[in-house]
Image: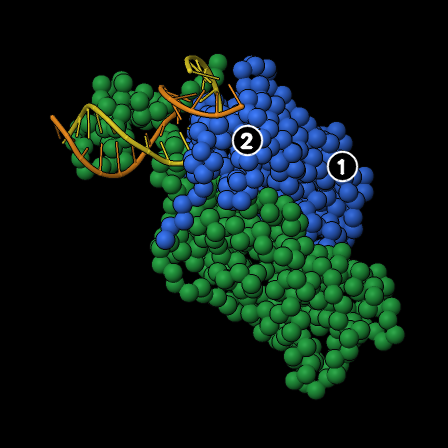
Chain colours: A blue, B green, C orange, D yellow
Amino acid sequence: MTVRQITVKDIAGKLRLHYTTVSKALRDHPDISPDTKHRVLSLAKELDYHPNSIAKSLKKQATSTIGIIVPLIKNDFFSAVISGVEEVAYGRGFNTVVCQSNENSDREAIHVRTLISNRVDGVLVSVAQTSTSCDHFRALPKQGIALVFFDRVCEDINTDKVVADDFGGAVQAVRHLIQSGYKKVAHIAGPKSTSIGRDRCKGYVNELKQNKIQINPEFIIYGGLQEDDGVVATRKLLSSSTIPEAIFAVNDPVALGAYKEIKRNALNIPKDVALVGFGNNTLSSYLDPPLTTVTQSPYEQGKAAANMLLKRIENSQSGNPSEVKVVETKLIIRKST
Amino acid sequence: MTVRQITVKDIAGKLRLHYTTVSKALRDHPDISPDTKHRVLSLAKELDYHPNSIAKSLKKQATSTIGIIVPLIKNDFFSAVISGVEEVAYGRGFNTVVCQSNENSDREAIHVRTLISNRVDGVLVSVAQTSTSCDHFRALPKQGIALVFFDRVCEDINTDKVVADDFGGAVQAVRHLIQSGYKKVAHIAGPKSTSIGRDRCKGYVNELKQNKIQINPEFIIYGGLQEDDGVVATRKLLSSSTIPEAIFAVNDPVALGAYKEIKRNALNIPKDVALVGFGNNTLSSYLDPPLTTVTQSPYEQGKAAANMLLKRIENSQSGNPSEVKVVETKLIIRKST
DNA sequence: CTGAAAGCGCTAACAG
DNA sequence: CTGTTAGCGCTTTCAG
């Protein structure tokens, strides 16, 4: 007993009209008389007619759908970005499809392929940390699909981007540590393959130099972007010959790992080791002590990215040069420093 | 310079074959000779052919896509459910579309309509707290679209469901409080319109009765499911004539609100007021003191719900009676009690 | 104002 | 083994 869904033909049949007439009436086309429009509309409601957007998309060669690829939705930075994107997309009649890469490059490539097959009109992406190459994204522009990166971007692909001021945020964080009197400041850095990893590390190095502090290579530990990576890096730092007085972590999940490992060693934050994160994830304000960190307005980033993408979609012919939007960051000082 | 995407016809033209032959070759149909298959496949790769799933779906009258409607993805209970759903959906060749209701019944109804228009094969939903009526979901089964509820379910719609043992979990939580010596146990209850609100409240009432403790109506405060609701309810409890010795909150976000309000009043948890949540959200283990709560295996719930849904989709004709799967809950005792 | 015809890209049934 | 034909549900163009 498969239920066949109602189509324009069904309603045309009952009304003894041609189905194209019905189609026009449903779309409020000026051709059609108010009377027939009314009859069509009321029968449509009565029969519970739902237009088939599959068919419409096929005909129109456009789906009014955008894809969003993020590493992990449970990271509340990304959840907030998604909400921002939805806000503007829905407001302009677009739908969204959210895809998680799980920080996995292969999964990411599969999502790209699926989104192309589903003929989305545009894609927003924040790159997985295991994606050393960005080649799998090139298919998008090649297929005429708009592409905007946010947060973790691919520098060697020439498209619009939205990023936080990663360099500036890192500078603020490190400056605050130095001004608070910490001399031996270490950095748990993100993967060199990610833009945020590189830029935040540059900010760290730059600010130390500004303060004429010698860069100690043992104080820069490279790793991933998750909690576990913070644990591992901190273990290394705490077992080295000179223990740092303060740690600047590439992001809040990593800072959380550091936090746990520092506590596990029965050390006091900030007396023994001060700690700064990046991202202002919800969790950070609940730690004991609450974490000093850098906000990066994820909701605004999401809205900005969606607006850029829709602009590209709506005038796809224009070859405007690509834009990079940088959103402000701000240091939030709490008790961990 | 709109880029037209490659179709079967393009590759057929270059190979001087009929496009249906190409279509079959692409799908590895036994009709086609290995030689032509090979030529087709390699040209497809060379031209960067991406099959148009829109067209395929239209023809097949099936999209291999399931929709998931959740209140808020930033709640990590739901993020974890989504991951579980994705795990099984991807494994069986299905795609997912994640929709947030933002706890808003109207938004939820819009999502339902959009999903129907997009002809998804099935929908998974956890109901928004403002949805007092479930009527907007009835269109789904009526249109022949499979429907499975999880976590927050609609009891008056006859479909498959996956729920935690809400009653049992509440009983465990309250029993633990009583056994720990707390006599005056209050409950911050969820909306009566939600299944979790009702069932957890029943568990609370039941366990008090089991212990011959008089139910004090002033100790049951009804509210929503978010942090703010916990704040408001706690304010009420703390300003009443008799202050409770312990609070059982309907879920972790509400418990978090309670936690904040208790601390704001400079009261000690658990000495002045003990606190139990429900859900084991990530945050709960980081509070000070860490929160005693009830786990409900969100990842497993997601997998179970997806499996039930796919089973319905794959044998849509069979009118098997609807199933309700109950997943175990377990009390996690931390320092807040 | 309404109807007819064509086509979006694909698959399925049937013919050669 | 390959080709032909028809059609999924809709929109668009052109006739009536």
* Residue B77 image offset from top left, x and y in percent: 59, 56
**For the point 58% across and 74% down, which residue is it?**
B168
Camera-side residue of B191 and B261? B191
Left or right, A157 with reference to B190: left
The secondary element bearing badge 2 is classed as helix
> Which amino acid lies under the numbered mark 2 shown in the image of this protein?
Thr
Rendered view: B173 above or below B10:
below
Residue most toward the bottom?
B212
Name the quadrant containing residue B275.
bottom right
Closer to the camera, A52 or B238?
A52
Q: What is the x, y in percent for residue A235?
A: 59, 52
Gap between marks 1 and 2 measured at Cα: 59 Å
The part of the image, by quadrant, that contains residue B242 is bottom right
The x, y position of residue B237, in whole percent, is 82, 69
The residue labelled by disc 2 is: A36
Q: Tell me which numbered mark, 1 or 2, is placed earlier along the sequence.
A: 2
- In this view of the protein, which residue sits in the foreground, A150 or B64? B64
Say which quadrant the C terminus of chain B sits in.
Answer: bottom right
